[in-house]
């Protein structure tokens, strides 16, 4: 799953989505499906944003490509957050939902405008969440192999991954 | 002192082989937070060790993605 900056989404959802799927493909991932999951108010400000759009994608990738790909997403400021998890299978209905979005005439509702936040508050939120974020990042690589996620299993040869 | 701790009833029952707890099910996860947005203890959630671990992982993921608050 990817949390995208609404400014990018507002300009053009399809392009915002392609930005992510292109980065995935560039790192050798095979994208199985991708769709707009939701547009929401964030539980806490992230980089001064109070709202954002979530993209949910399922893809296959070999473990060796993962670190390079993480780096790409870390560096891209249009991606506010991302989460990648191993999954056994794509949940039922997921492919259909993604296909609907690709159909002709499908209109993505434009994200509402940002709620008014004072600059101080935005800065505060950004600073406030940084240590935690870094903490999570440091823990993230260790978490997957160690097996808290183990139930999510390996898929033969390439793991199907959901990034959130 | 005998009744100094009355166990509060578990929030929700869960079978261990139910589908994995999804970090995207924010409304469900929210039930397992204190008003200060802390994760309920196993005793109060009523979950077994495995399910509690799953719950914690799901809440942490939801927090990371900005779907849930760290503090209230
Ligand atoms: Zn259990």
Image: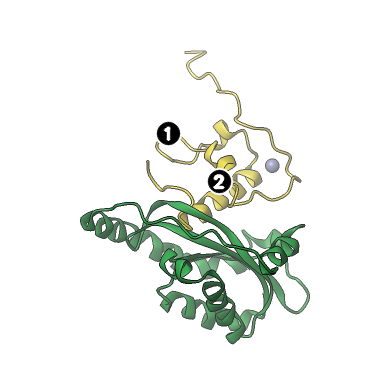
Which mark lies nearer to you, 1 or 2?
2
At a point 60% along the width and 44% down the height, the residue shown is: B52
Q: Which residue is mark 2?
A: B26
Name the residue furthest top.
B2
At a point 56% along the width and 41% down the height, the residue shown is: B27
Q: Is residue A66 visible?
A: yes
Q: Which residue is mark 1?
A: B35
Element on which disc 1 rests = loop
Image quarter in which the C terminus of chain A is found: bottom right
| Label 1 within 8 A of ligand 1 by Cβ | no
Q: Is residue A164 visible?
A: no
In the displayed structure image, the side of residue A28 where residue A13 appears, left or right? left
- Spatial CA distance of label 1 from label 2 is 15 Å
Camera-side residue of A40 and A24: A40
Q: Toward which corner of the image does residue B15 lie, by quadrant?
A: top right
Of callouts 1 and 2, which one flags the residue occurring earlier in the amino acid sequence? 2
Q: How is the image coloured?
A: by chain
Chain A image colour:
green
């Amino acid at each position: 799953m990817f949390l995208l900056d609404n400014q990018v989404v507002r300009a053009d959802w399809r392009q915002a989505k392609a930005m992510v799927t292109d980065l995935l493909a560039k790192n050798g991932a095979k994208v199985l499906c991708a769709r707009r999951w939701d547009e929401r108010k964030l539980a806490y400000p992230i980089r001064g944003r109070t709202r954002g759009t979530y993209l949910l994608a399922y893809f296959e990738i070999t473990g060796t490509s993962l670190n390079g790909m993480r780096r790409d997403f870390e560096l891209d400021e249009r991606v506010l957050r991302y989460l990648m998890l191993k999954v056994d299978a794509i949940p039922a209905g997921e492919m259909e939902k993604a296909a609907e979005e690709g159909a002709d005439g499908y209109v993505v509702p434009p994200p509402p405008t940002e709620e008014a936040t004072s600059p101080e508050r935005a800065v505060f939120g950004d600073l406030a969440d940084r240590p935690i974020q870094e903490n999570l990042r440091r823990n993230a690589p260790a978490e997957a192999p160690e097996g808290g996620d183990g139930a999510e299993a390996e898929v033969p040869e390439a793991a199907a991954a959901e990034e959130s | 002192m005998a009744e100094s701790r009355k166990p509060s009833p578990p929030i929700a029952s869960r079978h261990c082989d139910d589908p994995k707890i999804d970090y995207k099910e924010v409304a469900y996860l929210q039930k397992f937070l204190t008003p200060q947005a802390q994760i309920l203890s196993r005793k109060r959630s009523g979950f077994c060790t495995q399910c509690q671990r799953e719950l914690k992982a799901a809440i942490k993921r939801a927090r990371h993605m900005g779907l849930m608050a760290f503090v209230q």
